[in-house]
């Protein structure tokens, strides 16, 4: 009897220990909101959604198309805008049947204008291998703002102004073209009966070049450029040439030679960002 009683007491003690241990585990469990969960990779709730970038392509195209069509309504001779990344110049240009029509004529009113209009050479098309655009240089006494027509191009004769102004664009009917300035130089003209002509080796105003003549012209430009830009141009490049006058030097012209490096169509969409296209002559 004593042996059985001892055994019973041991059994009861073990049962009590097990019960207490179970209660302790239960009371010390982690609350539900502190447990670590491994999210299901296929769960739509736990997956991270990447932000979707809005597509402004059609809006950008419409923006530039409107600029072009609005200006053509004003004057069918309008061909586009020439503008710099820096906004050094952002102005329209036109084209007539000769290079004298817009020399002293306002492109919007067609009335006499001493400053004339920026115009593309009459022998060029927008597909020419060399597009030439002319614009007047205005003396400080006539234009104290120094913004009129191609007057701001005078800043590019200083190398310190090159880097900030080296990128040029053309807004055309169906595309925007990007150019980089390769050379800035003074072309020396030849006078005959009061008229100034380009020299044989410096015919920058040709809409296309034979390869043989291009080599002559290229070498002449490189020898006369005002500073090294780090850019060069070749016969295969599509070129843009900007011309303006030089103050107090009727026998010279400032010439800026650029080569095309990119293009953005603006038909159904356009990946060229919308920018302020305010005429730089009127910008504050």
Image (cartoon, grey):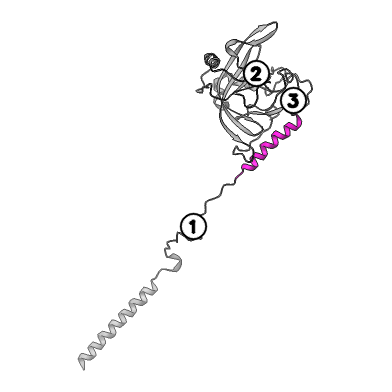
* Alpha carbon distance from label 3 to label 2: 18 Å
Residue lying farthest top? 193
Local crowd size for mark 1, using a 10 Å CA cut-off: few (<14), some (14–19), many (≥20): few
Look at 78% across and 24% down and name the residue there.
Answer: 110
Q: Are marks 3 and 2 in contact (CB under 8 Å)?
A: no
Local crowd size for mark 2, using a 10 Å CA cut-off: few (<14), some (14–19), many (≥20): many
Q: Is residue 280 left or right of residue 129?
A: right
Labels 3 and 1: the sequence-earlier one: 1
Query: On the image, numbered disc 1 is attached to which residue?
Result: 47
Where residue 44 appears, as percent x and y from the top left, is 51, 60
Label 3 residue SS: loop
* Alpha carbon distance from label 3 to label 1: 59 Å
Q: Which segment did they paint magenta?
A: 55-75
- Who is closer to the viewer here, 105 or 166? 105
Query: On the image, numbered disc 2 is attached to which residue?
Result: 244
Query: On the image, numbered disc 3 is attached to which residue?
Result: 107
Look at 68% across and 32% down and name the residue there.
Answer: 278
Dot in front, 3 or 1:
3
Q: Is residue 11 visible?
A: yes
Q: Is residue 19 magenta?
A: no
Q: Is residue 56 magenta?
A: yes
Local crowd size for mark 3, using a 10 Å CA cut-off: few (<14), some (14–19), many (≥20): many
* Alpha carbon distance from label 2 to label 1: 61 Å
């Amino acid at each position: 009897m004593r042996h059985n009683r001892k055994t019973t007491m041991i059994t009861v003690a073990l049962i009590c220990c097990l019960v207490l241990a179970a209660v302790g585990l239960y009371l010390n469990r982690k609350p539900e909101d502190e447990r670590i969960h491994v999210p299901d990779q296929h769960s739509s709730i736990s997956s991270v959604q990447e932000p979707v970038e809005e597509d402004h392509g059609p809006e950008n195209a419409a923006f530039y198309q409107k600029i072009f069509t609005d200006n053509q309504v004003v004057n069918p001779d309008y061909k586009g805008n020439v503008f710099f990344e820096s906004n050094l110049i952002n102005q329209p240009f036109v084209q007539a049947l000769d290079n004298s029509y817009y020399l002293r004529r306002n492109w919007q009113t067609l009335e006499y204008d001493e400053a004339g209009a920026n115009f593309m050479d009459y022998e060029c098309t927008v597909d020419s291998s060399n597009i030439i655009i002319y614009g007047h240089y205005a003396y400080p006494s006539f234009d104290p703002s120094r913004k009129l027509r191609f007057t701001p191009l005078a800043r590019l004769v200083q190398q310190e102004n090159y880097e900030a102004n080296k990128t040029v664009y053309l807004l055309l009917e169906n595309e925007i073209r990007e150019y980089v300035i390769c050379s800035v130089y003074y072309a020396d003209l030849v006078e005959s009966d009061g008229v100034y002509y380009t020299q044989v080796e410096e015919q920058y105003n040709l809409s296309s070049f034979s390869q043989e003549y291009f080599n002559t012209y290229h070498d002449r430009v490189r020898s006369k450029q005002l500073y090294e830009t780090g850019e060069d141009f070749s016969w295969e490049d599509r070129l843009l040439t900007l011309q303006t006058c030089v103050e107090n030097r009727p026998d010279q012209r400032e010439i800026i030679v650029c080569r095309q490096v990119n293009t953005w169509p603006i038909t159904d969409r356009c990946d060229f960002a919308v920018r302020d296209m305010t005429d730089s002559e009127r910008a504050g």
